[in-house]
Amino acid sequence: MAKTKIKENPDLVKDTNTGAVINTNSNAFTRRRAQMALQIEKENKIEQLEKDVAELKKLIKGLSK
């Protein structure tokens, strides 16, 4: 697999056979993966909180009858 460096970004190389751009900076890749995992975790927490609020609303409405 022949690779050429990309002038604008030293962390990227281009595979001359497939034309794919490859990030060789593994630290940036690891940080991005961690960032994505944290975002998913936050979204899951928000979703759970929304479900909890809906359940509380339902319980409160049941008490007022």
Image (tube, grey):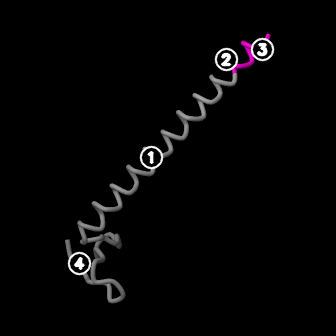
Label placed on residue 64 = 3
x and y percentages locating residue 65 in the rendered image? 79, 10
**Residue at (25, 82) in percent of width and height:** 4
Residue at left 28%, top 74%? 15
Q: State the predominant SS element of the stretch in magenta.
A: helix
**Alpha-carbon span between mark 1 and mark 3:** 37 Å
The residue positioned farthest toward the front in the image shown: 64
* Contact flag, marks 1 and 4 (Cβ < 8 Å): no
Q: Left of 12 or right of it: where is 65?
A: right
Q: Quadrant of the N terminus?
A: bottom left
What range is drawn magenta here? Answer: 58-65
Identify which amino acid the numbered label 4 is placed on.
Lys
Question: Residue tagged by mark 2?
Answer: 59
Mark toward the viewer: 1 or 2: 2
Which circle, 4 or 3, is nearer the viewer? 3
In the rendered structure, which disc, 4 or 3, sits on the residue that comes first in sequence?
4
Where does label 1 land, which residue? 40
Q: Secondary structure at mark 3?
A: loop
Q: Residue furthest bottom?
A: 7
Look at label 3 and name its amino acid: Ser
Left or right side of 34 for 61:
right
Question: Where residue 58 sits in the image (x, y, percent)?
Answer: 69, 20
Q: CA distance from mark 4 to mark 3?
A: 70 Å
